[in-house]
Image (cartoon, helix red, strand yellow):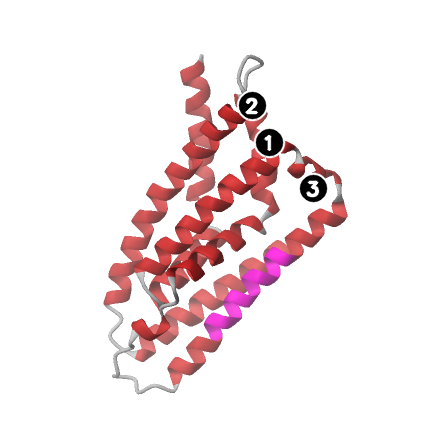
Amino acid sequence: MEQFSMLGYVTVVSMMVLTPGPNIAIILQSVVTRSARSGFGNLFGIVGGFYFHALCSTVGLTLLLKQSPTMYAVVKTLGACYLVYLGINSLVQAARTRRMPAAQPVNTATNTRPTHGAVLEGFITNVLNPKVGLFYLAIFPQFIGPQDSVPLRSLLLVTIHALFAFGWYSILILSFERYRSRLGGASMVMLARVVIGVVLVGLGLRVLLS
């Protein structure tokens, strides 16, 4: 019975990870416009956000957020605005790239922020998404038995989610890095930044209006 229970949980979190959303968008932005190292920085921040939400769910903060429409709206609005900010920043960078000669290779090293900045970017994006915390609040009780230790069981569940996300996003980062290495000039980088910027702004507006 326990094996079937864990299989059900893995199925649920795998579908959540595979569904395109803000996490994939910011990783794509970091890798294509900066480096794979920056993308992995985002990934560590995102995984840290998982544990933050799991902790909040375990101690009841997420329940409080769920019961307060005002608090939920504030957190959701902040998260949406942050995504829009990232998208606009990508569009601004695209405009700057447009002024470069079309055949000139782009020096991505100048666009690489310190790794801790990328970690913070991923962490903030995840923390300001209240749907992650509400997901844990809804799903954890279904896989925690009356005889289980709630903190230990919650730690196990979030770790399974984190490991699956780390594996999948790592594959995406390495794939995006191969694409970035083939961007031969400023025009291709500009196009990538425009697309990513529009996607991020669209995601932010969708979160804001949902």
Residue under pointer 3 = 65
Query: Which range of residues does the magenta coloring cover?
Result: 78-91
In the rendered structure, which disc, 3 or 2, sits on the residue that comes first in sequence?
3
Q: Is residue 153 above or below residue 104?
A: above
Q: Is residue 175 above or below residue 17?
A: below
Q: Kindly check if marks 1 and 2 are in contact, taking CB atoms under 8 A apart as contact.
A: yes
Q: Position of residue 40 (x, y in %)?
A: 35, 53
> Could you tell me the amino acid type at mark 1?
Thr
Residue at the spot 59% in from the left edge and 43% down from the top edge: 131
Q: Foreground mark, 1 or 3?
A: 1
Q: Foreground mark, 3 or 2?
A: 2
Q: Quadrant of the N terminus?
A: top left
- Give the main secondary structure, helix, strand or loop, of the magenta stretch: helix
Residue 184 found in image quarter:
bottom left
Foreground residue among 4 and 119? 119
In the rendered structure, which disc, 1 or 2, sits on the residue that comes first in sequence?
1
How many residues crowd mark 3 within 10 Å: few (<14), some (14–19), many (20+)? many
Residue 210 visible in the shown view: no
Residue under pointer 2 = 150
- The label on residue 160 is none
Residue under pointer 1 = 58
Q: Is residue 64 left or right of residue 184?
A: right
Considering the numbered disc 3 on the image, is that residue within a helix, a strand or a loop?
helix
Q: Is residue 61 left or right of residue 36?
A: right
